[in-house]
Image: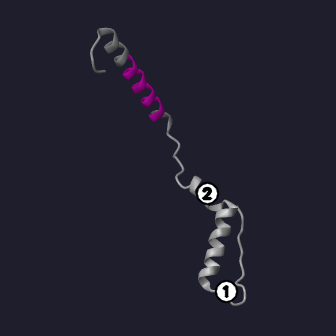
Amino acid sequence: MANITLRKKEGESNSSLVYRFSKKVVQSGVLKEVKKHRFHPRNVNRRKRRASALHRERRKLEVEKAKRLGTPRF
């Protein structure tokens, strides 16, 4: 990550300093990088992965069976 430092220029107001800082942050891409990593998904344990896979497989078989039988909703 970039380390952004600014010094207040002589006669510069606080609001213009904040404006310059926020412009530098956007240009450096720091904000975009932080937002990208904000929500980090947890690793799902092995038991839950297996249960999810079994559920998908069962659901897939139910849908195929319903299609064969010609039911309108599956």
**Foreground of the two, 67 or 26:** 26
| Up/down of 37 relative to 68, above or below | below
The spot of residue 39 in percent (x, y) is 52, 52
- SS for callout 2: helix
Choose mark 2 or mark 1, whichever is in front. Answer: 1
Count the marks: 2
The spot of residue 53 in percent (x, y) is 45, 27
Three-letter residue code for mark 2: Lys
Tell me which numbered mark, 2 or 1, is placed earlier along the sequence.
1
Q: Which range is magenta?
A: 48-61
Quarter that holds the C terminus: top left
| Up/down of 15 relative to 59, above or below | below
Quarter that holds the N terminus: bottom right
7 vs 63, left or right, is: right
Q: Is residue 44 magenta?
A: no
Q: Is residue 50 magenta?
A: yes
Residue at 29% from the left image edge and 9% from the top image edge: 69
| Up/down of 3 relative to 72, above or below | below
Residue at 27% from the left image edge and 17% from the top image edge: 72
Distance CA(mark 2)–CA(mark 1): 28 Å
Our reading of the magenta stretch's main secondary structure is: helix
Check disc 2 and report the residue beneath it.
32
**Foreground of the two, 61 or 31:** 31
Three-letter residue code for mark 1: Glu
- SS for callout 1: loop
Please tell me the numbered disc located at residue 39. none
Q: Residues within 10 Å of mark 1 (few under 14, many from 20)?
A: few
Check disc 1 and report the residue beneath it.
12
Mark 2 touching mark 1, by CB under 8 A? no
Colour approach in the figure = one colour
71 vs 45, left or right, is: left
